[in-house]
Amino acid sequence: MSSILTAVAVICAINTALAILLLIAEALIVDTGECRITINGEKELTVNGGRSLLATLKDEQIFIPSACGGRGSCGLCKVAVREGAGPLLPTETPWLTPEERKAGIRLSCQVKVRRDLSIKIPDELFSVRQYSTKVEDITDLTHDIKQVTLKLLDPPEINFKAGQFIQIEVPPYALTDEPVYRAYSISSDPAEKDRIELEIRYVPNGICTTYVHKRLKAGDTVTLNGPYGEFGLSDSDSEIICIAGGSGMAPIKSVLLEMARAANPRRCRYFFGARSGRDLFLADLMRSLEKKLPNFSFIPALSSPQPEDRWDGETGMVTEVVGRHVKDASRAEAYLCGSPLMIDACVKLLREKGMPEDKIFYDKFA
Amino acid sequence: MQELGFFAILFSAVFTNNILLTNYLGMCSFLGCSREIKTALGLGSAVIFVTAATSVLNWLVYAFILVPLDLVYLRFIVFIVVIAAFVQLVEMIIERVSEPLYNALGIFLPLITVNCAILGVSLFMVIREYTFTQAAGYGLGSGAGWALAIVAMAGIRQRLAQRSRIPRGLEGPGIALIIAGTMALAFMGFNGMINLN
């Protein structure tokens, strides 16, 4: 017994000594001192070097969208770096097309700030802010999707376009040692500036979804940043085809609420795919929108309806249902939100129906 | 066994008992990083530094912690931990001192941690019961021997790439392995000058 204890103690002692040595070395060696970051040739920041560009910019209240929180696994945090980034890293190459490489696009979570940098980011990212909010309400939409209503505290209002998303900060808890950020589409009407709604589906062991489903309760404070994203209704008058599945309902709902408020006369069909009756939600709201918008129809589709659902609507995969309803899509626009598999299948189908690729807009849930 | 001095052991570790060419340890980075002399030199010097430092450190840890406490069986874990910490240190230093070298070494730098030549040196010195000076000489010598082998290999490959037409089926690792074998044969010529075992 005592020999086991000595063994453990010795290993611990050696490891601690080495860890302390490394920490001292890191403090002495890695800090590269102050670096200047020039943004869009105008704004200039003076920051401490040694960390990733993404993290450094976040400390300066400039939020680059990133769904994975800086692990290099989502490929969203692209930034054009004109000077000072160093050569492309193997962790970045899978995310960049040859054109992007030529244009100096890099993943900001992989680029380390080592010297003065000159970067270019879209102007709208300057309007991205950090918000502190309070949970006003959490309701079950289905057995695994919750609707979370957040009341904005500071700043008290948010301006966003229907279809955009925000990032929630998940504080450290049992599943994570450091704050992580996860992106969710806003599902409420942009006219409601003092609160936002999110629809969050539970993923077993998902860091953010577990936090929201098992821990968060009304009255808690939540930090978020945003809004981000280009997903949203175009300015044309062509027909609209929306296709969503699961919590992909969120951005589409926001777009529809805005259309209802503006009494938008465009023809719009919304196909919503679910497995069975218990996965279908907000159908009443959609029916009431059908009354407000004369050219809107909601077409839910169940892929495997259960006997107790007494389902008399469309059945089959959402792509099959779209295929049955839409004959010629060459003059329509499509807005998709759902799993990557669903998106890929829908894009393929719509292309077959004659829709040009640049008329298909989507957010993929990674 | 006759007692070998620091320099004798250093010399023999470089030439007669080259850890790479007689024990075939550390082959992966030897093959992966030997395309250019410059990179090979960089990796070689990093390996020299790490082997020299870790053999001394590991000897101290072994003699003053593991043996008195009767924990010799922990040597594998302890040696690897010490090596890993040292590689981290070297990585920080190289990143600070020479960024081009840091980028050129790429993944092979953290991979020094699992370079079996380095763990091999620590284990050999323990098995052969070296004294402290001998261990220091052996560590430095083995590192230098490994560096010599990879630099020589890089020189040959660099020249091959410029001048020779290699049969298609042997390009890349194929020809590298043949060269490594030939080099090992050449180094066998030194064998017998000093016997380490």
Image: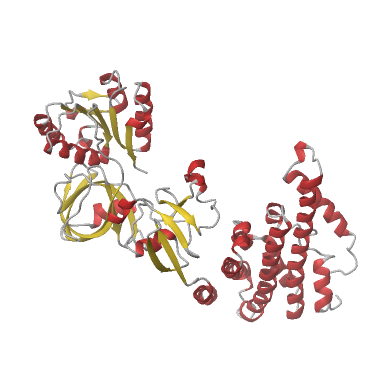
Residue A345 is situated, as x and y percent measured from the top left of the image, at: 37, 29
Location of residue B147 (image quadrant): bottom right
Q: Is residue A50 visible?
A: yes
Which image quarter is the C terminus of chain B in?
Answer: bottom right
Q: Is residue A135 left or right of residue A72?
A: left
Location of residue A268 (image quadrant): top left
- Between A83 and A354, the residue placed more toward the observer is A83
Location of residue A126 (image quadrant): bottom left
Q: Is residue A104 left or right of residue A249?
A: right
Q: Is residue B186 left or right of residue B89?
A: right
Image position of A353 with respect to B42: above or below: above
- Between B71 and A203, the residue placed more toward the observer is A203
Q: Residue furthest front?
A: A42
Q: Residue at x 52, y 47 (%)?
A: A93
The colouring scheme, among rainbow, by chain, secondary structure or one colour, is secondary structure
Which image quarter is the N terminus of chain B in?
Answer: bottom right
Q: Residue at x 76, y 48 (%)?
A: B176
Q: Is residue B195 left or right of residue B52?
A: right
- Between A195 and B110, the residue placed more toward the observer is A195
Residue A311 is situated, as x and y percent measured from the top left of the image, at: 18, 26
Q: Residue at x 81, y 43 (%)?
A: B164
Image position of A262 with respect to A155: above or below: above
Residue A135 is situated, as x and y percent measured from the top left of the image, at: 17, 57
The number of callouts visible is: 0
Residue A38 is situated, as x and y percent measured from the top left of the image, at: 42, 61
Q: Residue at x 78, y 47 (%)?
A: B162
Q: Is residue B197 visible?
A: no
- Between A327 and A280, the residue placed more toward the observer is A327
